[in-house]
């Protein structure tokens, strides 16, 4: 959005959100140059009126803890970019056998993961507001690591398991480094033969990671099994629930969510609500762990209370209440009325309202 009109000393009349729904600056915030510079990092929007154009006088020391927290947002982008570079170097180094030490990339990753955990209330939306990279495999790997670790925290797993989940996500697609770029980056539909080649990345990843000295075996298993489904419909081995480790079941949820939300060569990134609907459908079909999906979806939807959204029938509404049993079917305020999505199966949320 055009930042013209944003000058130090103006007080916001409305919240400023990113287009994915994370609150950047609250209504009533007195703008400082640091806030204005921060907005350059994001595709942002106002809700309601724009700005009160009457400058106000600020005391030099009047910086609240909330304002300091808001100005930290660009730090995530910097750490994210550095981690992408580490992942890229590690993936390429391990294939050429120049570097098989994963510790440096894990250390850099832990910086971003901890930052995400410290911003748990807005973690997912913040991840998806970092500016896009062309290297979709590396971006996807980092995102899945962050989401998997976050799900582990939501499920209250021990911290070592949370970090292990992050590592599994970080390296789950390393096998794609052995897939030809003309297939990986093909903008159109894959042929049956090309799809068979793509599916080999799970076994390639397992073979690559099994050769990394000192690496937890579960990381290799994650690379092998993240496309397996509880009902046996996945690949490469058609495993069923009892043969898919619990951490790999969590990894699968994180992988699907990011695959939908992140822009790819063959599709634009879609909204969190589209990803949520897919996760819920797959859980109901017996493909994904229902408890994991419900916990993650509940976490996501709670972040969106009060947000304006677009429905598949073209109407707009505001999320007002999240039911525990079906968090993806909230109560909405539409105009002067309320709409309970639990009672209207044909209506769903498609995106945030711009």
Image (cartoon, rainbow, N blue to C red):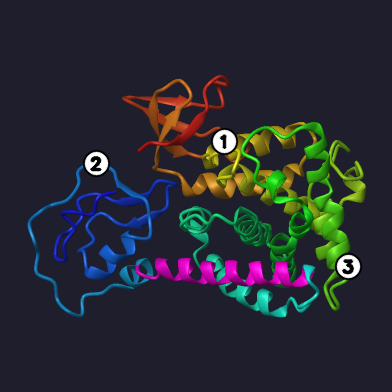
* Residue at (78% x, 39% y) in the render: 194
Q: What stretch of residues is rendered in magenta?
A: 71-94
Magenta includes 147? Answer: no
* Residue at (35% x, 38% y) in the render: 354
Question: Which residue corresponds to mark 1?
Answer: 274
Tell whether label 1 touches label 2 (CB within 8 Å).
no
**Up/down of 338 relative to 306, above or below:** above
312 vs 267, left or right, is left
Tell whether label 3 touches label 2 (CB within 8 Å).
no
70, 328: nearer the viewer: 70
Magenta includes 85? Answer: yes
How far apart marks 1 and 3 lie (CA) works out to: 35 Å
- Residue 63: percent from the left, percent from the top? 25, 74
How far apart marks 2 and 3 lie (CA) works out to: 54 Å
Examine the rendering and report whether any part of residue 27 can be seen: yes
The secondary structure that most of the magenta stretch takes on is helix
Question: Which residue corresponds to mark 3?
Answer: 210
Sequence order check: which comes first, mark 1 or mark 3?
3
313 vs 51, left or right, is right
* Residue at (54% x, 65% y) in the render: 116
Disc 2 on helix, strand or loop? loop
307 vs 51, left or right, is right
């Amino acid at each position: 959005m055009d930042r013209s009109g944003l000058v130090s000393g103006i007080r916001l009349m409305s919240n400023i959100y990113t287009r994915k729904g994370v609150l950047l600056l609250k209504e009533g915030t007195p703008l400082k140059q640091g806030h204005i510079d921060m907005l350059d990092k994001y595709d942002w929007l106002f809700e309601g009126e724009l700005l009160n154009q009457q400058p106000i006088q600020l005391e030099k020391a009047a910086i609240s803890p909330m304002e300091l927290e808001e100005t930290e947002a660009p730090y995530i982008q910097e750490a994210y970019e550095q981690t992408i570079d580490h992942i890229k170097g590690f993936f390429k180094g391990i294939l050429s056998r120049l570097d098989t030490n994963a510790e440096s990339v894990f250390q850099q990753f832990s910086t971003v993961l901890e930052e995400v955990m410290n911003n748990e209330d807005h973690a997912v939306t913040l991840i998806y507001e970092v500016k896009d990279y062309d290297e979709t495999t590396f971006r996807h790997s980092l995102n899945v690591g962050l989401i998997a670790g976050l799900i582990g925290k939501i499920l209250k797993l021990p911290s070592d398991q949370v970090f292990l989940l992050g590592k599994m996500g970080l390296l789950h697609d390393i096998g794609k480094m052995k897939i030809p770029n003309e297939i990986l980056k093909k903008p159109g539909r894959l042929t049956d033969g090309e799809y068979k080649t793509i599916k080999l990345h799970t076994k390639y990843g397992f073979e690559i990671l099994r050769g990394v000295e000192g690496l937890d075996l579960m990381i290799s298993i994650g690379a092998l099994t993240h496309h397996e489904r509880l009902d046996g419909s996945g690949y490469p081995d058609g495993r069923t629930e009892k043969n898919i480790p619990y951490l790999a079941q969590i990894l699968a949820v994180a992988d699907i969510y990011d695959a939908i939300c992140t822009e790819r060569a063959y599709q634009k990134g879609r909204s969190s609500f589209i990803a949520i609907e897919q996760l819920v459908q797959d859980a109901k079909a017996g493909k994904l762990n229902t408890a994991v999906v419900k916990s993650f979806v509940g976490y996501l939807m709670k972040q969106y209370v009060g947000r304006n959204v677009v429905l598949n029938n073209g109407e707009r509404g505001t999320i007002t209440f999240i039911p525990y049993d079906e968090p993806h079917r909230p109560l909405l305020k539409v105009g002067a009325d309320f709409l309970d999505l639990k009672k209207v199966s044909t209506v769903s949320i498609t995106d945030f309202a711009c």
